[in-house]
Amino acid sequence: MTTTLTEPEGAHAEWPGPLPGAEPLPGQLDRWLATRGAELVAIRRHIHAHPEPSYHEFETAALVARELAVAGLSPQMLPEGNGLICDIGEGDRVIAFRADLDALPLQDLKDVPYKSTVPNVAHACGHDVHTTVMLGLGLALQQLAQSGQLPGRVRLIFQCAEETVPSGAPKLIAAGALKDVAAIFALHCYPQLPAGLIGVRSGPFTAAADTVDIKLSGPGGHTARPHLTADLVYALGKVIVDVPALLGRRVDPRAGLSMVWGAVHAGEAFNAIPGEGVARGTVRILSRDAWRTAPELVTQLIKDVVAPTGAQVEVGYHRGVPPVINDRMAAAVIAGAAGAALGAERVVEAEISMGGEDFAFYLDQVPGAMIRLGTGAPGSDAKHDLHQGDFDVDERSIGYGVRVMVHTALAALATAAF
């Protein structure tokens, strides 16, 4: 073992066997996985207790690389040492899987043995689970490869910096992560679903997430004489209210565009009109086409709204991530694989999220799909939402995730559509 943590105890960490209605894994993998369950849970807890922020995932990447190397694989580290790529099996055509390694700049508020030991850094989005599931997938597929039962080549991509902008996906792509890849898959923890359920959706899955910041300037003055000023508070109010409303009339409503302001500041005194004001917000879009035209449109609308006020405006529109658009065939493959892994009744339709996810960069180049992995404790009223300091998971979801991804790898390798 590469972790100093003790093996977990209790039903919460119980490694799940095949569920009723599920198909057995090939090559005695069900039996093999049962012997590795406690180890994988302990690895997840080690990663959870030792989180690393974006672009600093050195120890996490090294741990994954060591585990893969012990299994007889040859992981290739990024030059910076904060991510890696590992191929399993042989073949010209590759099916890829991606996991993200980084944690969030949040304080871990849980009272658990595996609580974060790093101040103000916590795995509050489940990337420790993503990493552990993909590691389990790699170890399982290596078992098949060593016995000659893996019908092709699978690539594991352990990515740095999903939680920041600029994010790590373009770096991994530039390092060759998508070379020869026919399709790519990923999962994301979803506490709104209980462990044992999988959410799948074709088409829009998560939104593009961009940021906008504006700076208004002009002559300030006394609130008794606003006609001698470019009333910046009034101008900011017009921008905050009118621009989102106008976007609703300039963009197809089916594009799912949402503009929300998160920070506004102008002035200090109640009786003085300031000479400068700022506002910052986000633009989220489900349509790839609308996302491509958004910077020019949003910038022009802001300028048009400000113009009659006499204020000067500077607009900064900053790209974040594109929308995740799940490929129809890839979504069908992983839905079928999840049904085989857990039973068809445990595959449900995933909701669309307006959150951002840089898995979209991979899907801009190859077909693929992301699914939601249920991590909630069945029957529990506790809601540990993503990006919250008390976030935690039912660790049985790790076993379910490994089974789903093994079935997905085999199904995708057998699919001629990719």
Image (tube, rainbow, N blue to C red):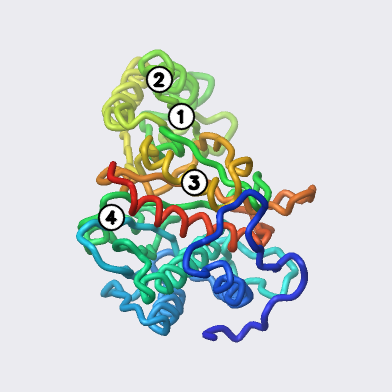
Sequence order check: which comes first, mark 3 or mark 1? Answer: 1
Q: Nearer the viewer, mark 3 or mark 1?
A: 3
Q: Which amino acid, by three-letter code, is at mark 1? A: Met
Q: Which amino acid, by three-letter code, is at mark 3? A: Ile
Q: Quadrant of residue 253 in the image?
A: top left
Q: Which residue is labeled 3 in the image?
A: 371
The reply to whether the C-beta atoms of the residues labelled 3 and 1 are less than 8 Å apart is no
Circle 3 residues within 10 Å: few <14, some 14–19, many ≥20 = many
Q: Which residue is labeled 4 in the image?
A: 170
Closest to the observer, 276 or 307:
307
SS at mark 1?
A: strand
The reply to whether the C-beta atoms of the residues labelled 2 and 1 are less than 8 Å apart is yes
Q: Which residue is labeled 1 in the image?
A: 259
Q: Nearer the viewer, mark 4 or mark 2?
A: 4
Residue 235 visible in the current orientation: no
Query: What label does residue 247 carry, if any?
Result: 2
Sequence order check: which comes first, mark 4 or mark 2? Answer: 4
